[in-house]
Every structure is written in C-alpha cells, then in structure tokens.
Image (cartoon, grey):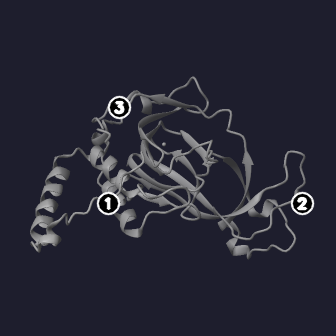
Amino acid sequence: MGIETTTPNRKGNKEIYGLPVETNSHSKTRKCRRRHRKMSPVQRLYQTCKDVFSYCGAGIVPSPEDIQRLRSVLDTMKPADVGLTPELPYFRMTVARRTPAITYLHLHECEKFSMGIFCLPPSGVLPLHNHPGMTVFSKLLFGTMHIKSYDWVADAPEDKSTSANPSPATPPGVRLAKVKVDADFTAPCDTSILYPADGGNMHCFTAVTACAVLDVLGPPYSDPDGRHCQYYLDFPFSHFSVDGLSVAEEEKEGYAWLQEIEKPGDLAVDGAMYRGPKIVEN
C-alpha cells in the first residue's frame, strides 16, 4: 500500500587476485535462477517489487527494464497463485446494498510499495480516483471489467464556474482531462500500468462480471506525505465553456471535465484476511 540496502558487488575480491570473474558470476546466476524456480509466484512478485522500487519514490518511475521485469511477473499471475476462486463469498451479488461492497485483501505494504487485491462482485465500482506521484500496476486475475481512465491536459485553463448550462449544483474549479482508456477488459489480459503524469493516472473500475484485480503501487498512498486518494466526478466536455479553450467537434468525446469530490458515501471497501500462499518478508 523497507528501506533497501545497496546491491552487493557480485564480483567480490576475485578481481584483486586476478581470478576469473565470469565463472563465479555464472554460478551465482544459476543459483539465483534455482531460488526463483523454488519461489511461489506471489513470493516472486514480492521480491521483484522490493528490487524494482528500492530506489524509487514519489514521482520517480522505475527504469523501462524494471517496468518490463515487474510486468512480466504480473502477466503470469493466476487466481490460484493468491488463493482466489470466483466461488468465494467476496464475489457474490448482494441485495442488501444498492452499491455492492468491495473486498480488499492486503498482501504487503512498506514505504516503497504495496500489494493488494480488490475483489469486486458484479456491478461493483471503484469510483474515479487518482494516484499522486505513483507508478501503478494492475493485473486483472479473472472476470470482465470496464476501465475508464484520464490524464490531465497540461496548461489547460480551469473552469471558473462559467457553465453552458448554469446550475446551482455545478460548483466551480473543474479541470480538463483527456480520456486515456474507455474499454472492457477480460482476463487473461496484459497488466496495465499507469504513471505519475500519464498512462491514465485517474481511473474508474466497474465490474461487468465478478472480478479480481491485483494492484501494485509504488509508492503507496500516504496522507502524511501528501499522497492521499482524491475522488472525482466527470462531466462531458460540452457541459462547460471556458474562454480561450476549444476542441474540434469530432474530438470532444475524448475530453472531460473532472471535479474533486469527497469520498463517495456509498463506497464500501471491506478488508478481509489474505489466505493465499504466505509471503516471507525479508
């Protein structure tokens, strides 16, 4: 939702004595590969996250090589790797609430990264929210989910309550964003990645069927550090009119106005015990 030591010098003292370095390096590589083969998939995910995010922080994105490395691990993850099946009670329809409750399974959290699973019953919604300064990996483990995401439009003027359809219920201060994704995804599918300033940093998840999403956040939310979760309402581009701002008619559907709101009152996210394979923290 761990401060790492520096990586040891794999060459050791062999260079001092003029001994061949490659032999030991290959030996260590083989041992490392054997250890990785023995790891459970979720343990491998933890170890990879620990390595990838060790020198990262708010607004600092891992290298392209590390992004691909972590993505490759997540792409192979299956529901059974974290002890999930669609038959678990988290994924059942309920009639007691108008908005289905979502269950969150906490796997790990430190100051560098967090790992957790959102379990959504059919029609469950994680409303539009942001990820300030974060790099986020989302792996859909099973089911079908609709994802709509946005990025802010750089240098766009904010609306100052000038509305094409004035209404007392329309407050000022909305900001222009560009649609990044607006589509259904069905597992198995590739891991999606968002970044501090692009990739769809603000997104909304809607469960078309029961589904589970494994999320990795680097770094996690932290109110003391100013990384709190902010929620939004989105309005069609044509809903507001701002001086000096225009978009071609055929492109208007690709933009929206976003307004910050308090956490929706009907959003219920219940924590539950993770009962999958154990993660050994080190």
Q: CA distance from mark 2 to mark 3?
A: 50 Å
Q: Is residue 10 left or right of residue 31?
A: right
Residue 182, above or below 40: below
- The residue carrying pointer 1 sits among few (fewer than 14), some (14 to 19) or many (20 or more) residues within 10 Å by Cα, namely some
Q: Is residue 265 visible?
A: yes
2 vs 1, front mark = 1
Q: Is residue 188 visible?
A: no
Label 3 sits on what residue type? Glu
Label 2 sits on what residue type? Thr
Q: Please name the residue that numbered disc 1 is placed on.
A: 72
Residue 44, above or below 151: above
Q: Please name the residue that numbered disc 2 is placed on.
A: 162
Under circle 2, the secondary element is loop
2 vs 3, front mark = 2
x, y percentage for residue 109?
44, 41
Q: CA distance from mark 2 to mark 1?
A: 47 Å
- Rendered residue at 47%/58% (across/down): 56
Q: Earlier in the sequence, mark 3 or mark 1?
A: 1
- The residue carrying pointer 2 sits among few (fewer than 14), some (14 to 19) or many (20 or more) residues within 10 Å by Cα, namely some
